[in-house]
Amino acid sequence: MGQIDLSQVAITAANQKIHSLAADGQDIEIVNPDARHNIGVGLVVDNPVTVRVRGSAGYFCGGLSDGARFEIEHNAGWAVGDNIYNGTVVVGGNAGAIPGVAIRGAEIVVRGNMGSRAGQVMKAGTLCCGGNAAFMAGYMMYGGRIIILGDAAAKVGQDMSAGEIFVGGKIESLGNDTMIVDMDAQERDEIREFLDRFELKFDGDFTKVVNAGKKLRYAKAEPRHRPQPFFVSSKSSNYWNPKVQEDIWIKGEVGRYRIRGYGASKPVPHLNDIAFARDISTISPDPEELKDINLKTTVGGRFGAKPISLSMPVMIAPMSFGALSRKVKIALARASRLSGISENTGEGGMLDEQRAEADQLIFQCLSGRLGWNVKDMQRADAIEIYISQGAKPGLGGQLMAKKVTPELAAIRGIPVGIDLRSPSRHPDVLGADDLVIKLQEFREATFHKVPIGIKMGAGRVNDDIKIAYKDGFDFVELDGLQGSTGAASTEVLENVGIPTLAAVQEAIDGLREIDAGDDMDLVMMGGLKDGVDIVKMLALGASCTSVGTAAIIAGGCIACMQCHVGTCPVGIATQDPEHEARYDLDKQAMNMHRYFESLRWQIAAITRALGHDDVHKVGRGDLVALTPEAADITGLPYRPEHKTDHRPLTGLELLDRKAG
Amino acid sequence: MCGIAGVLFKTQGAHEIGKTLIEMLDGCQHRGPDSTGFAMYGETRDLLQLRFIVPTDEAARKDAVDNIASLLARHDAAIESEQSVGCSYQIAVRFDGDLLEFTKDIEEHAKLVSVGHTLDIIKDDGTAHELDDLYNVGEFTGTHGIGHVRLATESAVRPEAAHPFWATGFEDIAIVHNGQITNYWKMRRRLERRGYSFHTDNDSELVAVYLADKLSQGETLDSVLETAIEDLDGTFSFLVSTKDEIGYAKDNLAAKPMVLYETDDMIAIASEEVSLNRLFPGQSINSTEPAPGTHQTWARSI
């Protein structure tokens, strides 16, 4: 048995020692823990070892681990056993808030009392409490069982989708959409077996709480209607237009807000309202002359982790397997490899084929912890914690019932066929202060080897970017109002958040206000469509960009905005095998790859035309504003005459020149 | 975006309040790396003690100090002693007039951060240990105190935006707060109509003034905290200290962490157990997490 004294060893070194002792099959004793955070985080073992904590543990003890047994003699802080797939945690004393959060099969036993929101978003396994549970036990749980031998405070099972909660004592009140049902003899026997195994004595009877099934699906789904392409609906008037008309029709049928795919379609100040200060019509069509222009970009090297390495300042935006079909995720991964850029898992887990195809893969962690696990974290090239996205800042993801197939439900650990509404916030991140500890947990789980980023929708960017910087993230992915999604309410899509142009400016200003320098990489996204946009974004101050909608369109999307329905006519936004069969993976991967190569050529050509040999040398001096609004937002000089004299070439015009 | 800590020794005497709070705040400095603050209660003095934030630049500092002297002169407050350290200027004055009127006038023209016969608030940019190096916080002895670490999002980290906040107009009352008050403007307008003025847009200042207003109407700290949970909307855990008591209040959602540990001799409260455990290294302590929507107060023996 190995011993580690936490009064002598810092937590990172202690965790490394835990990993190496465990690899030798040794049990581990932690002395003088004194409620320090992240003990044992990231421990993945095949042979069952026991980590004994001789005292109290802080936040996330045993979190993001797999296969080990943790015995904490005294108390545990927030989120004990966070996200464990297999393994055991026994807390001798009390546990703080959200014990057993997001577990996927673990056994968590708290001999004393447990804090609020116990078992939030848990998927499988057992969470058992010998004492009383604070309010909202089983909040948003998707499966598994919670056994409470004492009393349960208010709102037991609030917003649970599935699973069972057994309460031995009094229930203060039930959460919404829950009901009390009878227990059968088998359940009683299984609980008895569990209690005996952990030597918990209880002679009373239980009240069983389950989901009542009234809110798992919207009463009425969006009707299928004649597709009205995004690019038709968003043109002309921003007041009465075909989309407004369609919105009203649909609301008349479903009697609530309308859910649809894609992003904001109303006109807002954007990169079109900015031009290059120099006449770039001298642009060279000769690829030979462009091969020395440096486009190489790295992201996330701020604290010495291995940065994401890109052949140009472009990433593929996070889009989930779930919103998109398996074939599309594989095609995106392949195209990213062929073009030397990165792919991103989005919400809902990592696919083996996606991992194999992509050279650089970012793994995204969302509030519902759907498909999130330590093993995939440890094979990712970067981690990104999702706070929100440009399409719907402040709201969680939505995946409508048609897409929640048995396969998808199994990956995410949720019931089949529900209208999945992911939580709007992380269970364990209720402020910048908690986020610091969460970030540290991620670093421990990935051995400080890969960059950890944060994805944010553009809201109060000026504050948020400072928090991201001060909390110590390696990179930020910032998404403006024009960012798209697979499903959100149309009013939110159109109205919540600030435009991408304002977002990048606020981010740059915010970082400058705190003298942050440029060590935290800023990846901008939200309505970027070509190399022109990308160079402008870099000139404004971004260090990299990310494209989602444009990549999908290159890969066959017809922009009908019905991504949420699940019957995508081209097999992209669907989980239906019949529809997915229509998708030609090999062909579309090459289309996306060629689109990315068009970006590369444009970025290089414009960089050269602006007089630089490196895309990272472009700057604000290379830009002017064409409208008073854009000048006001960015502080760039207002030069309306550039509209006619030095109008930037569109992507098509550039390609024409290349061809001609 | 912060961490809080408080301690009260139940028996009279010169307890190591400064050292205790430094340990606790160092334990949760990860929650707020930008600024740190202490509100500490020592022996009751005859003179009123005031602490101002002044510029660190020599010339600007002299102007500020001269300005403070002329402000005090027009209220017949005689400066008996003065001390200039770090970003602060501390004086002891003889003053017998109406404190509310006196401080209201001064606050319009100077950055007054602490007023009291027993209270001293020390706050600045930097960590708990950095403040100790500059202000000798560790040497402070007394019966109780509260402290705060903060992550700032404003343009420049300014010491006057750091916690604790003194309850404008009322001596010897301070608060530290973790969270946000979402009905801030509604409550602020209500208090402004009652004649109070605000010097920051910080919601923690509002909590301090809100509590002080109620206390001035003769309510007990305990009943004030009970009403605060009903009146204030948002997510919060805050600590309040008066000349003889400390107390906490926690919102109904318990979104902000707080744990406490009580013995026969003392009560310690902090955002995280790691801060409490700093006072008892190597021991397992029977801490408890207060239930949502609760409050409690403790008094030192008088």
Image: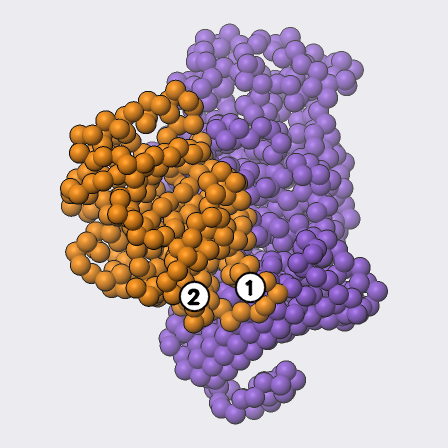
SS state under label 2: strand
Query: In the picture shown, does residue A377 fall above or below A157?
Result: above
SS state under label 1: loop
**Residue A21 quadrant:** bottom right
Q: Nearer the viewer, residue B63 or A347?
A: B63
User: Where is mark 2, residue-wise?
Assistant: B266
> Same chain, marks 1 and 2?
yes
Residue at the (74%, 44%) spot, across then down: A358
Residue at the (57%, 21%) spot, across then down: A539
What residue type is disc 1 on? Phe
**Where is residue A83 shown, x and y percent of the image?**
62, 62
The C terminus of chain B - image quarter: bottom left
**Where is residue B29 shown, x and y percent of the image?**
53, 48
Mark number displayed over residue A241: none
Q: Nearer the viewer, residue A115 or A178?
A: A115
Q: Which chain is purple?
A: A
Q: Nearer the viewer, residue A392 or A155?
A: A155
User: Where is mark 1, residue-wise?
Assistant: B280
**Where is residue B247 shown, x and y percent of the image?**
34, 61
What residue type is disc 2 on? Met
Q: Colour of chain B?
A: orange
- Disc 1 and disc 2 in contact, CB within 8 angstroms: no
Query: In the picture shown, does residue B102 fall above or below A577?
Result: above
Q: Nearer the viewer, residue A254 or B215?
A: B215
**Where is residue A595 shown, x and y percent of the image?**
67, 31
